[in-house]
Image: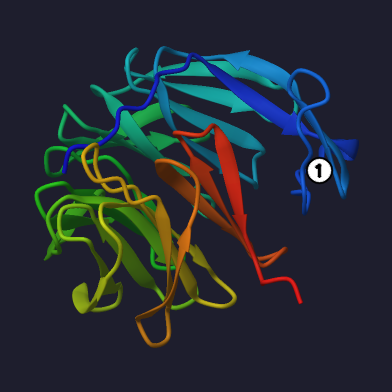
Amino acid sequence: MPSRPAPALATVATLGGAGRALAAPAAVSAPSARGMAHGAQGCIAVIATIHVGRGPNGIASDRRTSTIYVANGSSNTVSVISAGTDSVTATIPVGRSLQGVAVDPRTDTIYVTSRLGNAVSVINGRTNAVTATVPVGAQSFTVAVDPGANKIYVPFFGGTVSVISGRTNTVTAKIPVGTGARGVVVDPLTHTIYVANGDDDTVSVINGRTSTVTATVAVGHGPVQVAVHPKTHTIYVTNNGSIVAPNDTVSVINGRSNTVTATITVGSDPEGVAASSRTNTAYVADHGDGTVSVLGPCPV
């Protein structure tokens, strides 16, 4: 699936408001000042810009240690940021063409995918040292962790998902899914894994206990990323189509029935998606528009 290219950045912006709470406003006005917007819950602004390596791609946080990890795809490093000081405390050389990063907060372990290195690097969060390199498939963009099961899931663009044991740092299973597998997310309560298959226009549903695909759900054209609401077990899938056939929708899947319950048009070229259990909303990064679409209950 030909994808629309994304720009490379060399900074990380920190957003904050009163008390640096990251509460998302229900409605946000046009920016009243550079990097600032006022909404129903007050002001949210860019309060810091942190210089990291070249071409940052994936980013993940460890809430237990208040540490942020950034995978720098062009400089082949991971920047370690202290959320308390908004400063880089370490730079770790890792792999080639880094893409995704995920954190297991229970073990304080970080997992980073190397698209050209065809591997996942394992980093000890206490020492900031690479403790293992686990070979996986080529073109591995993303990674997800199931902390309760101590398992790591890495989709391979060719159509498999590698399952890594967090205890042994070895691949314990390879699960066939659709082609163009890219986005992956874990429902930590049900130990269910969802994989967006960009070339098949499907989402594979995997039982984490048996490492088998239990359902394949047809979604929009060119699914890219996927997020889960852990309380409602609702899955959100961004579909950005291709250069010649944009889609620009989000498919909403009921995790209990594995059926699409809604298809919502959003902004241009949707990529990343995140769900908030606190506000019962989902946030979609509209790459082409430079906006974020907020999905929630329809107004009465």
Query: In this rendering, does residue 112 appear at all?
Result: yes
Query: In this rendering, does residue 166 appear at all?
Result: no
Amino acid type of the residue that numbered disc 1 sits on in the rendered structure: Ala
Secondary structure beneath dot 1 equals loop
Q: Is residue 264 left or right of residue 199?
A: right
195 in relation to 259, above or below: above
Q: Is residue 32 left or right of residue 208?
A: right
Q: Please name the residue that numbered disc 1 is placed on.
A: 21
125 in relation to 297, above or below: above
Relative depth, front residue between 106 and 70: 70
The image quadrant where one finds the C terminus is bottom right
The image quadrant where one finds the N terminus is top left
Q: Is residue 117 left or right of residue 191?
A: left
Q: Is residue 31 left or right of residue 200?
A: right
Relative depth, front residue between 164 and 180: 180
Give the residue at x 81% y 20%.
Answer: 33
Count neighbours of disc 1 (C-alpha within 10 A) and say few if under 14, some if 14 to 19, many if 20 or more.
few
32 in relation to 180, above or below: above
View extreme (front): residue: 244
Quarter of the image where one finds residue 196: bottom left
Give the residue at x 36% y 38%.
Answer: 100
Give the residue at x 50% y 35%.
Answer: 125
Q: Position of residue 98 (x, y in %)?
A: 31, 27
Q: How many marks?
A: 1
Q: Position of residue 143 (x, y in %)?
A: 33, 47
Q: Position of residue 135 (x, y in %)?
A: 14, 40
Relative depth, front residue between 261 and 229: 261
Q: Position of residue 191 (x, y in %)?
A: 39, 73
Give the residue at x 52% y 17%.
Answer: 90
